[in-house]
Image: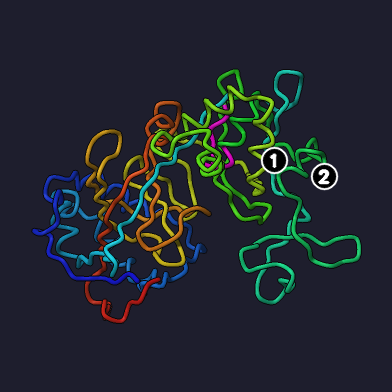
Amino acid sequence: MWSLRPISYSALSGWKDDDHGAALAAFQRQALKPIDERYKTGSIGITPAAFDPVIALSQKPEAIKNPRHFFEDNFSAYKLVCHDEKRGQVTGFYEPEVDAQRGSDAQFATPLLRRPDDLIVLNESNRPSTLSEDYRFGRRDGNGNIVEYYDRAAINRGAIDVDDLAIAWIKDPVDAFFIHVQGAARLNMGNGETIRITYDGKSGHPFTAIGKNLIERGEIAKDQISMQSIRAWLSKNPDQSRALMEENRSYIFFKEAPSINENLGPIAAAKVPLTAERSLAVDRLIHTFGTPIFVQADTVNNAPFQHLMIAQETGTAIVGPSRGDIFFGSGELAGEKAGAVNSLCDFTILVPHGIGFDEAGVQLP
């Protein structure tokens, strides 16, 4: 069981040495959220509306002049503590960048697909008893019954018309798999054209971490697992790579972003551009998007990591109060940084003043 305990900023190791201006820039991007986008209130109990006044204040010259004081003056800090002294965990994610083209050929033969028309969003009113609550999407079969959607293996074998659904085609199915895991990508289309794709739904099946499967089978040592070591294994074992990737039945569908700005990260679940090393993917059932979270990780890329971050993304594998995924930016270097991250950590939540928040009433699993 996790709980929240008040903590002073002076007692937060690394707080005063952080770059609060970088954190402020990420928080200011909350003002870019579309008017019709409505966040859900996480179980911690901070309503999305509680952030509106401080988002407005974050744009003021006073905040920009002294960003550390802005956070200290407008938020109270609460550390997430587990009753059995368990700690949290952070990993990393990034926006891959690959060559692509609109049509397929012998070289560009792996598709990145848009959302199919027959993909149905499941909820309490239409989810059949045969499908668990983990399934957020399904389809209707020939008899009109809602069933699970086609999984990765079925789609790879032609269950849906990929020629009709393809946004673009890339060379390497391993690249496509990791684009699915990251949920976004920049596609270099040639002739100077670059398009961005972002998450737009999935087959609905539970996410399976193939790295965990490789550890359990003795293929990669636990202390050696990373995106790079998984890629190396897939490259060394091409006869087994497709079957291993298909063990992750979850298949991701994408949409094109309307435009691209090289200075901004991809627009993710919170519908605002992500900021490298300042945007955090969290469990959205627990944390409300826009929440500033001070992350103290033991080691990130061979150094302690003590950064104030903003909850602006989520992910299937990001489950629990103190579980996070750090965004590292776009491209190969960002991928190298993100793929090597797997660290114990502690979370401190920043709660806006004056909202009647009572940490004693927060009970987390």
Name above or below for residue 217 compared with residue 170.
below
Asked if marks 2 and 1 touch (Cβ < 8 Å), the reply is no
Mark 2–mark 1 distance (CA, rounded to whole Å): 13 Å
Q: Residue at x 66, y 56 (%)?
A: 204
Whether residue 173 sits left or right of residue 279 in the image: it is right
Q: Residue at x 27, y 56 (%)?
A: 346
Q: Where is residue 361 shown, x and y percent of the image?
A: 31, 81
Q: Is residue 202 left or right of residue 119?
A: left
First of labels 2, 1 by sequence position: 1
- Point 41% across, 56% down: residue: 282
- Percent across and percent down for residue 337 are 37, 32
Circle 2 SS class: loop
Q: Which mark is residue 159?
A: 2
Looking at the rendered structure, which numbered label has been put on residue 113? 1
Mark 2 or mark 1: which is in front?
Answer: 2
Amino acid marked by disc 1: Leu
Q: Residues within 10 Å of mark 1 (few under 14, many from 20)?
A: many
